[in-house]
Image (cartoon, helix red, strand yellow):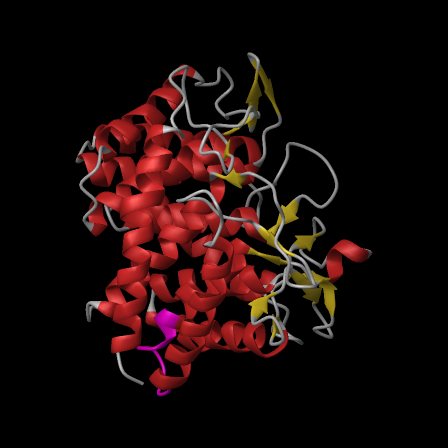
Amino acid sequence: MSTTALQSAWREARDWLFEEALPLWAEVGMDPAGGFHDQIGDDRAAVAAPKRLRVQGRQIFVYAEAARMGWSGPWREVIRHGLAFFDSHAPADGLYASQFENGEARGCTLYDQAFVLLGLAHARRALDEPRHETRALAFLDGLRARRGRPDGGFDELDAGDMPLQSNPHMHLYEACLAWRALSDAAPWRETAAAIRSLARGVFIDPVSGRLGEYFADDGRLAAGAAGRVAEPGHQYEWASLLMLDSREDDAAAERLVRLACDTGVDRAREVAIFSQDIATGAPIDPTARLWSQTERLRACLLLRGRTGEPDHWTAEALKAYAALQRYLAVPGRGLWRDRMEVDGSLDGDPAKASSLYHVIGAYAVLQDAAEGRL
């Protein structure tokens, strides 16, 4: 299949990203009082909502990637704005709260801590400031001391049910891979290797090949409904990270992507659904989130050069790209919808800042494919 279609898709994606989304979220998305707004409505005005820690780290990532991709807007100012939020909310006990509203901090999940490390990695790369690694290594040490597990993983909370969850580890893996590309420090290699081992030995079900989400303390799938859940979007996302880690896991990554495409995509709507049964593949939640489409796009693009079927994976990638465009076709330029219902209708909620991280992650790989680097 010709690269021309990918080049056309990238031109369209670039115009939306560079001319609409990035300028909007750099201007309206930055709160002069500190940090990044969580939501913007169709009127292109910020919506009053609690600030989430994950958004602060993700927006640093977004604008660092934007700079790498050639965007000439005020990316330095945006990154420094996010770093200032980390500075002003630095916790006394080592870990950050997950949510902030009216001076009150709430929650503390592993998931959100991962995005502190991701944000610091991309700030270090974009700004060429090595000092951020000292902070990140100390933060990882504190995370290991407070949440570390004997199996090399981390507990999601200090205490509670289902302490072992795959998704937070995926984002911590992503952060460690970003740091590993910048540094020879052993903690990044060792933590990434431990999480990769958990993915291959625990998170990926050896029978069905699908990826589990929730686990008991002993590493078995959680009891009840939670233990049945598999999310196609996360299979795509894990597959991409495994491919970025090394070529040793190409076969495992391809299996994750094939399973997600074969049983996790509703071909009537041509979208990856939110969740399915880990054993049977039957839909659990057939709604479809924006982020799942971006991860499908990214994983399929990466597989083009990793298998003997480049045309097949290019076709799948273009289907994922077309599906994603439906979420971006909204009244407010540079915005999106986050959820598609079973009937194909989209929610009317304000755009959530957290989704831009997924979009630019996929579009960065699309750019590489279109420009012949992939």
Q: Residue at x 67, y 56 (%)?
A: 219
Comparing 186 with 281, the one in front is: 281
Q: What is the quadrant of the N terminus in the image?
A: bottom left
Relative horizontal placement of residue 26, taking residue 107 as reference (left or right): left
Q: Is residue 120 magenta?
A: no
Q: Nearer the viewer, residue 353 or 237?
A: 353
Splitting the image into 4 quarters, where does residue 185 fall? Answer: top left
> Which residue appears at 62% of the width and 71% of the height?
264
**Could you tell me residue 111's position as x and y percent?**
54, 40
Q: Residue at x 50, y 60 (%)?
A: 326
**Is 289 situated above or below 54?**
below
Magenta stretch? 301-309
Quadrant of res 78: top left
User: Where is residue 2, by image quadrant?
Assistant: bottom left
Q: Measured along the vertical axis of the image, is residue 327 above or below residue 305? A: above
Helix, strand or loop: magenta stretch:
loop
- On the image, the x and y values in percent for residue 192 come to 41, 52
Q: 216 left or right of 76?
A: right
Q: How many marks?
A: 0
Can see residue 20? yes
> Is 5 on the left or on the right of 222, as rendered?
left
Q: Position of residue 272 (x, y in %)?
A: 58, 66
Residue extending farthest to the top is: 103
**Residue projecting furthest to the bottom:** 308
Q: Is residue 65 visible?
A: no
* Quarter placement of the C terminus: bottom left
